[in-house]
Image: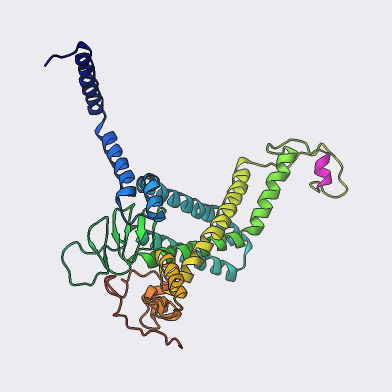
């Protein structure tokens, strides 16, 4: 067999190109190869899966975005925790350094007792529940063989899941009665710390609303003082009062001497006024935003469901409504009993010792089974 020179040259070029492409491919870092293989698997899953629908396509396309968000949230969780600690500590510092001396000097003894008692109770509730919410494990299903019933198998953990258990992409494991992953806690909100999370939100909302309402007049006075001295340029003592000072009433009635020395406005007064404005703006904003979140979680607790179950139950209710049937949440025991189960109230005294005071008691069940409660479901008329 005779070889044509052009054919031999073509064959050599092909071999060289393949070897160069292989060398170039081998020069890629390992993490780049893993990402390329992962992306190719995502694309292939769209047309190799016989059960592909719009939801699968959407999840596959946005999987890199979800992975990036989970990664960033996982590594920046500690930053959010420190941000909560710093902001809360700044408000407490302003309350002790600025507001408390004003309360002692201007309020009656009854109001002083109220502000001191309520303020310190609110502070203890915030600190206790935030610490417990961040440090308490949300609860994980056992990895070894167990006798508890399970309803499905996690497609990511490849482990059996009990009822109300869901997988958290940020924690990268299944969570018992998962509600959501909270970056401000750097922790998942699940069965064993859900009560701490809600009580922290409620206590912080009450504390911010308390500071916002009680400090409204101080905020207005501080804001007006800053604006007044800003326009009159009276930050340094000895500057003469201009005609504007007479117009806004800084001089006594009948006095028209524009060269009267102005009262001193020190750096300390300026910082006090700015700290009051900072406290009022921050607490008012948090009270509105966190108050809306707290009300939403209170509604979910009354219904006996979590944030994830709310979406699932809504879809199930619509599906059964098309068949002419009514969906009943199997984990709802009635509004009052749902609150008793959530707060761990077993007798009347627990409303004080376990609700109004800091308490580290465990939930009424283990998070694996949900049929052993000491309460009965409310009778729902058919």
Asked if residue 185 shows in the view, the reply is no
Q: Residue furthest left?
A: 1
In the depicted structure, whether residue 343 falls above or below residue 62 = below
Q: Residue 249's x, y, as percent?
A: 81, 48
Relative placement, left or right, of 284 versus 169 is right
Residue 135 locus on image (x, y percent): 32, 58
The quarter of the image holding the N terminus is top left
In the rendered view of the protein, which quadrant contains the C terminus? bottom left
Q: Is residue 239 above or below residue 299?
A: above
Q: Is 116 in front, or is 147? A: 147
Q: Main secondary structure of the magenta part?
A: helix
Q: Quadrant of residue 76?
A: top left
Mark yes or no: residue 95 visible: yes
Instruction: Please state the horizontal and vertical placement of residue 296, each as a whole percent of the image.
Output: 49, 66
Q: Residue at horizontal 58%, vertical 71%? A: 110
Residue at point 68%, 36% (across, down): 236
Along the horizontal axis of the image, is 290 left or right of 332?
right
Magenta segment: 243-248
Question: Nearest the camera: 226 or 208?
Answer: 208
């Amino acid at each position: 067999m005779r070889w044509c020179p052009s054919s031999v040259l073509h064959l050599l070029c092909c071999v060289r190109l393949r070897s160069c492409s292989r060398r170039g491919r081998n020069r890629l870092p390992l993490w780049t190869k893993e990402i390329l293989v992962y992306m190719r698997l995502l694309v292939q899953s769209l047309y190799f899966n016989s059960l592909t629908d719009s939801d699968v396509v959407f999840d596959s396309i946005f999987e890199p975005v979800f992975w990036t968000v989970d990664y960033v949230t996982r590594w920046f969780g500690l930053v959010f925790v420190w941000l909560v600690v710093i902001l809360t500590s700044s408000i407490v510092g302003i309350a002790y350094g600025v507001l408390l001396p004003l309360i002692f000097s201007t309020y009656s003894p009854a109001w002083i007792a109220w502000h001191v008692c309520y303020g310190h109770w609110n502070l203890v509730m915030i600190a206790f529940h935030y610490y417990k919410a961040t440090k308490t494990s949300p609860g994980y299903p056992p990895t070894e063989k167990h006798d508890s019933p399970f309803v499905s198998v996690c497609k990511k953990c490849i482990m059996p899941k009990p009822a109300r258990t869901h997988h958290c992409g940020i924690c990268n494991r299944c969570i018992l009665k998962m509600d959501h992953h909270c970056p401000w806690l750097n922790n998942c909100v699940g069965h064993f710390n859900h009560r701490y999370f809600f009580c922290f939100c409620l206590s912080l909302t009450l504390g911010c609303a308390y500071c916002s309402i009680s400090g409204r007049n101080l905020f207005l006075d501080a804001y007006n003082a800053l604006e007044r001295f800003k326009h009159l340029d009276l930050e340094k003592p000895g500057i003469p009062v201009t005609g504007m000072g007479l117009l806004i009433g800084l001089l006594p009635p009948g006095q028209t001497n524009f060269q009267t020395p102005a009262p001193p406005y020190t750096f300390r007064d300026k910082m006090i006024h700015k700290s009051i404005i900072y406290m009022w703006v921050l607490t008012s904003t948090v009270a509105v935003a966190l108050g809306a979140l707290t009300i939403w979680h209170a509604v979910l607790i009354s219904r006996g469901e979590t944030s994830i179950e709310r979406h699932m139950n809504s879809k199930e209710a619509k599906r059964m409504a098309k068949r002419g049937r009514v969906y009943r949440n199997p984990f709802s025991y009635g509004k009052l009993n749902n609150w008793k189960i959530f707060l761990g109230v077993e007798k009347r005294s627990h409303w004080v010792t376990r609700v109004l005071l800091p308490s580290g008691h465990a939930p009424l069940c283990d998070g694996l089974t949900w049929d052993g409660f000491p309460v009965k479901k409310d009778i729902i008329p058919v």
